[in-house]
Amino acid sequence: MTLKHAILGLLSKWDATGYDIKKEFDDFMSIFWHSHLSQIYPELNKLEAEELITSKLVPQEGKPHKKVYSITNGGIDEITNWVGSPPDPPKIKDPFLMQVFFMDNISADEVIFQLKYYQGVRQKRLKEMKQTVQEAWESIKERQTMTPRLLMSSAVLRRGLEQEVQYIKWCEETIELVEACKSLWDADTSTESVLPFDEAKELVEDYFNVAVVLEEKED
Amino acid sequence: MTLKHAILGLLSKWDATGYDIKKEFDDFMSIFWHSHLSQIYPELNKLEAEELITSKLVPQEGKPHKKVYSITNGGIDEITNWVGSPPDPPKIKDPFLMQVFFMDNISADEVIFQLKYYQGVRQKRLKEMKQTVQEAWESIKERQTMTPRLLMSSAVLRRGLEQEVQYIKWCEETIELVEACKSLWDADTSTESVLPFDEAKELVEDYFNVAVVLEEKED
DNA sequence: ACCTCCATGTAATGAGTTACATGATTTG
DNA sequence: CAAATCATGTAACTCATTACATGGAGGT
């Protein structure tokens, strides 16, 4: 249960409504968290009951009323404590990588198509992220102020950007690998044109070595 | 609901027990999936009821009996279809990145300590992954056979490895950044030694540029 | 006219985790 | 002698997603 800390962390900075929190999740925290409004609202009520946050109703003209939450001293204690505690392991669910893992079930051409399609999806996302970061950076430069908070959130945003860049590069390299090993998919039909093992071996080893050195030579 | 497809995907390759499936998740699929036995067993029963898989009881000596599952034609259809369909977006929950995002709440020294600690955690994991991949690769070289299945799973494993390598590098670079910007944390106490904005700006821009080029110059 | 933004919630369902229950064999 | 491995499951609980409900303001 870390939605609690995602909310407390945000409220340790500014007061906010449930709606604001959701937007912050989507805009700047999507690399490590996500949640629905229908989960955020009950959680806010729970945190208020635990006296980690308080709220006040703010009526507005031409817009619905809003409930603005503030963190309490108890809430500050809770978040400070949590930030300095040993982290839980990440829980990743990446359906696309799972599809790739099982793509021997479809043809080489379809594999390439899927990889290209997903590369496009990621490229689009990278572009959006770049723009968000760019805008945030411009407003920092205008204010001429750097704080620990801005520094740490920049660090996380950079991690998100480089993750996208690398995912896109991986798609590219994997497309090339599949392209070069296409004939492996024909193993049942024609025995002739199938890639010899030693050639495939070379290709896969090179593919690994662009990203990570597997064997450190010992001599 | 993709646990279904994780199981069907595995059974499209070999027959397996619930226990085997769990091990495969932990050993080779942990980069994109994870699940508990208490979730796998009921799911297997459900898939059998849907006639996507079948089972037979195999008694063993000195070990508990086991229930070996095989995929049916219906199951093959289901997995083939799914692999070629547009993927759901990934769902990441990375509590450590979230902690980093909120680490303005603790001192610069504590931040550096946390980053170093987690870097160690990731280094350990990388080492384990390297060994798993190495062993798998050795056995492939012995068999002298390359198949689409081995190719695609290698691609996913490499993605996992490079992800770890990059995460470790990010920790390193972020430690350096925080080290250089340490005095930002003293802003309240001494107004003197605080880092001027322009210097901080330079440091952060360099930090971004090692990983990703933010602004493409247009002239 | 329709869609998106603002704003808050409840209800139902689905997915995931932890705890409980059992028990022989092998490894450190 | 304790811990891990093999092997299957149920029950209780927490967390996450989708659907439902409401409604005005402003843009295309």
Image (tube, coloured by chain):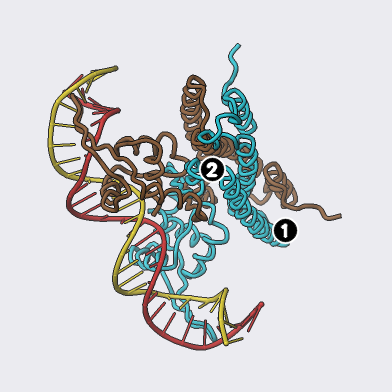
Chain colours: A brown, B cyan, C red, D yellow
Q: Chain of mark 1?
A: B
The percent coordinates of residue A106 (x first, y second) are 51, 48
Quadrant occupied by the C terminus of chain A: bottom right
Q: On the rendered structure, is A8 left or right of A209? A: left
Can you see residue B114?
yes
Q: Residues within 10 Å of mark 2 (few under 14, many from 20)?
A: many
Quadrant occupied by the N terminus of chain A: bottom left
- Residue at point 34%, 38% (across, down): A22
SS category of the residue bearing label 1: helix
Q: On the rendered structure, is A102 left or right of A191? A: left
Q: Residues within 10 Å of mark 1 (few under 14, many from 20)?
A: some
Q: Which label belongs to residue B141?
A: 1
- Residue at point 46%, 67% (across, down): B70
Q: Which residue is mark 2?
A: A111
* Rendered image quadrant of residue B44: bottom left
Q: Amino acid at mark 1?
A: Lys
Q: Nearer the viewer, residue B88 or A137?
A: A137
Q: Is residue B196 above or below residue A28?
A: above
Q: Are marks 2 and 1 on the same chain?
A: no
Q: Nearer the viewer, residue B212 or A157?
A: A157
Can you see residue B148?
no
Q: Are marks 2 and 1 in contact (CB under 8 Å)?
A: no
Q: Amino acid at mark 2?
A: Val
SS category of the residue bearing label 2: helix
- Residue at point 42%, 60% (across, down): B73
